[in-house]
Image (cartoon, helix red, strand yellow):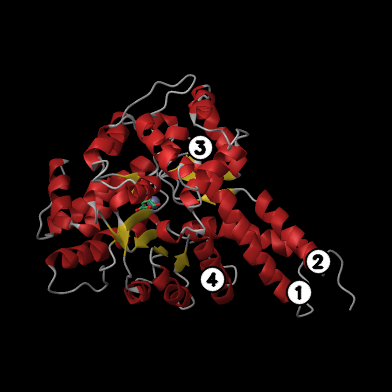
Amino acid sequence: MAHAPNTLASPADIAAAVAAAVERQPVIDMHTHLYPPSFGTTLAGRTGKSDLNGMLLWGVDELLTYHYLVAEVYRVVTPDKLPYEQFWRMTKRQQADHIWKNLFVERAPISEACRGVLTTIQKLGLDPSDPTPDGWRKWFDQQDPSEYIDRVMQVANVKSITMTNAVFDDNERQRWLDNPNVGADPRFTAVLRIDPLLRNWPEAAKKLTQWGRRAEENLSATSISSAKIFLNDWINKQKAIYLAVSLPPEWRYPADPNDPIARAGQTVLEQVILPVCADHNIPFAMMIGSHLRVNPALREAGDMVGKADVQSVVNLCREFPQNRFFVTFLARENQHEVAVAARKFGNLMLFGCWWFVNNPSLIEEITRMRCELLGTSFIPQHSDARVLDQLIYKWDHSRKIIAKVLTDKFQDVAATGRAPTKESIDGTVRLMLAENFERFRTAK
Ligand code: FIX
Ligand code: ZN
């Protein structure tokens, strides 16, 4: 059968075109916990000055003490052998050496988080087979933090890094108050993160009052307007491109009428957050399914996943057609139902394989299912990088899986006799890794 010019008929040509397109496409990383150097950096490098509470984490000791690896090392060196408080009293370097010894030397580094450290080292041109991290430490000490951000973005092929700016975090909030231009780095965009407003309004109300926005637990009209003014103020301060929260598995919309905290959260959602998002024409992002601190001694490594309720998202999308929702669920068990939900609502955009589903086997399962149910209208991944260097491995690993799934999908289409073109492949990849996000966030 004759094929139109620039169509790709052979499976090998399709595979090559998809691999090239995925590799070549600069990514907009819509959810990270990364910051420009203006937020302070724990590692000085060649020129910076180190700041213990610095929010930009980078370098091998931050890579090795990523909370994913803290959780994993406590599987093999249990708290009876190394009490948690003793671990947290160790220096970052001592913690990193402990994790290196127990997860990379005495055991095979086969977990995704362990492999990630090695992929990053390899792609930076360092030797992953080094017996210790010492040689790598010397290399990182020679880097200039800001130049190094450019290098990492170039190696990972990331064109824009979306921050998570938690305004209820004292360290973060003070930096914005001290320097209104702290976020003015063109490589980064800001997202106003407001978990306490929905997770615990009474506590949030106390904070708003402390910050000069009178608010009461009973959500009076004054409280509603104070909360709206507070959000408007911070959206403008940060030039936030969307608002975001993470929610527990038990979150429901509508809320359980017998649960006053949940009911307050519903009122804040309906009368504050969604109207403010609509006024600014920016989406609201919900990351659903994290049980926080089930083992508090592990700090950030102590959070857990729980099955959540997709129907609540369905209700919200139906009740608030004027709002746009970015949604990701933490539990594997929720992925199919929410992919079907997204077929029902154009104001619902699924994004990423979050946290405990950000593993190759599940990224493939979820991406394949989303292609089959949603075609090209979803955002396959975000990095959730907490350490700058992680952009390198998180996108390297995910790109390979996204390319594998898209290759199968395009080869299946070609097998029908309708061969894809290079343009349609490039266009699909551009949509998934950049434009679906841009178009949905700026939609009129
Ligand atoms: O709520 C979130 O944004 C989560 O991504 C983080 O809190 C979590 O600790 C994380 O780093 C997941 O990868
Ligand atoms: Zn995150």
User: Can you tell me whether the CB of the residue at mark 2 lies under 8 Å from the nearest atom of ligand 1?
Assistant: no
Count residues near mark 4 (Cα–Cα under 10 Å), then give few for <14, some for 14-19, many for 20+: many
Whole-angstrom CA distance, mark 3 to mark 2, is 38 Å
Q: Which amino acid does label 4 sit on?
A: Arg
Q: Is residue 50 above or below residue 153?
A: above
Q: CA separation, marks 2 and 1?
A: 8 Å
Q: In this view, does 121 lie to the left or right of 31?
A: right
* First along the sequence among labels 3 and 2: 2
Q: Nearer the viewer, residue 14 or 397?
A: 397
* Label 2–label 1 contact, CB within 8 A: yes
Check disc 3 and give the amino acid type. Answer: Pro
Q: Is mark 2 on a helix, strand or loop?
A: loop
SS for callout 4: helix
Q: What residue type is labelled 1?
A: Ala
Question: Where does label 3 land, which residue?
Answer: 186
Q: Is mark 1 within 8 Å of ligand 1?
A: no
Q: Considering the numbered disc 1 on the image, is that residue within a helix, a strand or a loop? A: helix
Mark 2 is surrounded, within 10 Å at the Cα level, by few (under 14), some (14 to 19) or many (20 or more) other residues, namely many
Residue 422 in percent (x, y) is at 76, 61
Q: Do the residues labelled 3 and 1 touch (CB within 8 Å)?
A: no
What is the residue that sits farthest to the right in this orientation? 2
Residue that label 1 marks:
414
The disc label shown at residue 370, or none: 4
Choose mark 3 or mark 1, whichever is in front: 1
The image position of residue 249, as x and y in percent, is: 29, 67
Question: Gap between marks 4 and 2, in whole Å?
Answer: 24 Å
Q: Tag 4 or tag 3, which sits nearer the N-term?
A: 3
Q: How far across and how far down the image is residue 398, in percent?
A: 56, 55
Q: Residue at x 86, y 71 (%)?
A: 4
Residue that badge 2 annotates: 8
